[in-house]
């Protein structure tokens, strides 16, 4: 069955706001499943570490400017973010190019690669280093050379990346009416959604910047009121089985519609937790079977 809605998501693997918005995105995936098609577009927050340095940002100043913000994001939204000072500034263009290469060469693993890159960068790893990108690719089920060959030998990868960047820097008229949700340029901040019905001359609902879940649900209800909503999961174990990958307690809580403390208590009874991520692997899966 063809999807009833198309959501184009503008994002970057190094954005802590996009990372903190993952619980809302996963909640939408749970509710609507294949009724919504998702497409990614890479914003590229920086093409070189010097992009930040030219604006007066150093790791020390970044720590001063962003540590408090990251701590507030972590406390409010609960996603695992390492707030310690980074040893150097990073460029995000290489990780974004890898995601675009996956889109062209391994499209069924594009989202998985973005996910792994996000997790690595929020853990404090430099995702502009080939070794980190390669590790994220292997974790996402991609042979790393598939990405690197695409980058070196296939000009279509860079063309697609530049198209993503241009689209991110051409916000819609509706988005321009909300300049406080845009970055200078102007450009979309992460995550920004463009929501429409695929094919034909349909209206589009654009949602720039980080927003509450209810904003996305209202847009979906107006554009496609016929969409069916999946019932709430029976328990946290059902959520982890559905995801097929480790989830943060905040993500499980959002999908279940419960608070994080409640989710963590339920997860501790049936799952294995490591560095803020929960899974049903090993002994935890045996608890469910018993």
Image (cartoon, rainbow, N blue to C red):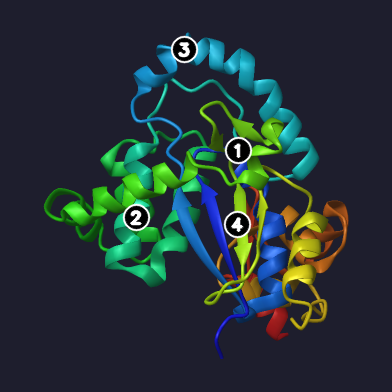
Q: Report, in whole angstroms, how far the alpha carbon at label 2 lies from the one at label 4.
A: 19 Å
Q: Nearer the viewer, mark 1 or mark 2?
A: 2
Q: Earlier in the sequence, mark 2 or mark 4?
A: 2
In the rendered structure, are the residues bearing label 1 and label 2 in contact, judged by CB atoms less than 8 Å apart? no
Which residue appears at 73% of the width and 76% of the height?
Answer: 224
Q: Residues within 10 Å of mark 3 (few under 14, many from 20)?
A: few
Residue at the disc numbered 4: 194
- In the rendered image, residue 57, in percent from the top left (x then y), is placed at 49, 13
Mark 4 burial class by Cα count in 10 Å: few <14, some 14-19, many 20+: some
- Could one spot residue 13 in this view of the protein? no
Rendered-image quadrant of the C terminus: bottom right
Looking at marks 1 and 3 on the same chain, the residue that comes earlier in the sequence is marked by 1
- The label on residue 16 is 1
Residue closer to the observer: 197 or 275: 197
Query: Which residue carries the number 3 mark?
Result: 55
Q: Which residue is mark 2?
A: 100
Helix, strand, or loop for circle 1? Answer: helix
């Amino acid at each position: 069955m063809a999807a009833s809605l198309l959501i184009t998501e503008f994002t970057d693997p190094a954005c802590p706001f996009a990372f903190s918005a993952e619980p809302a995105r996963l909640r939408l995936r749970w509710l609507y499943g294949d009724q919504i098609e998702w497409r990614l577009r890479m914003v590229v927050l920086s093409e070189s570490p010097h992009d930040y340095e030219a604006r007066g940002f150093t790791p020390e100043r970044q720590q001063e400017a962003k540590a408090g913000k990251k701590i507030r994001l972590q406390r409010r939204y609960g996603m695992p973010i390492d707030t310690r000072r980074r040893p150097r500034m990073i460029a995000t263009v290489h990780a974004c190019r890898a995601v675009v290469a996956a889109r062209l060469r391994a499209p069924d693993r594009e989202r998985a690669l973005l996910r792994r890159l996000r997790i690595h960068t929020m853990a404090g790893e430099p995702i502009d280093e080939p070794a980190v990108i390669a590790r994220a690719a292997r974790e996402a089920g991609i042979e790393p050379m598939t990405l690197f060959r695409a980058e070196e030998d296939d000009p279509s990868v860079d063309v697609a990346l530049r198209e993503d960047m241009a689209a991110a820097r051409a916000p819609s008229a509706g988005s321009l009416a909300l300049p406080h949700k845009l970055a200078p340029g102007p450009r979309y901040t992460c995550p920004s959604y463009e929501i429409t019905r695929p094919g034909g001359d349909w209206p589009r609902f654009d949602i720039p910047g980080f927003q509450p879940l209810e904003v996305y649900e209202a847009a979906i209800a107006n554009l496609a009121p016929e969409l069916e909503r999946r019932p709430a999961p029976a328990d946290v174990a059902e959520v982890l089985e559905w995801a097929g990958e480790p989830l943060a307690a905040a993500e499980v809580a959002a999908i279940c519609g419960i608070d994080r403390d409640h989710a963590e208590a339920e997860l501790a009874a049936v799952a294995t937790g490591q560095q803020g991520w929960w899974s049903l692997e090993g002994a935890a899966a045996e608890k469910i079977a018993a």
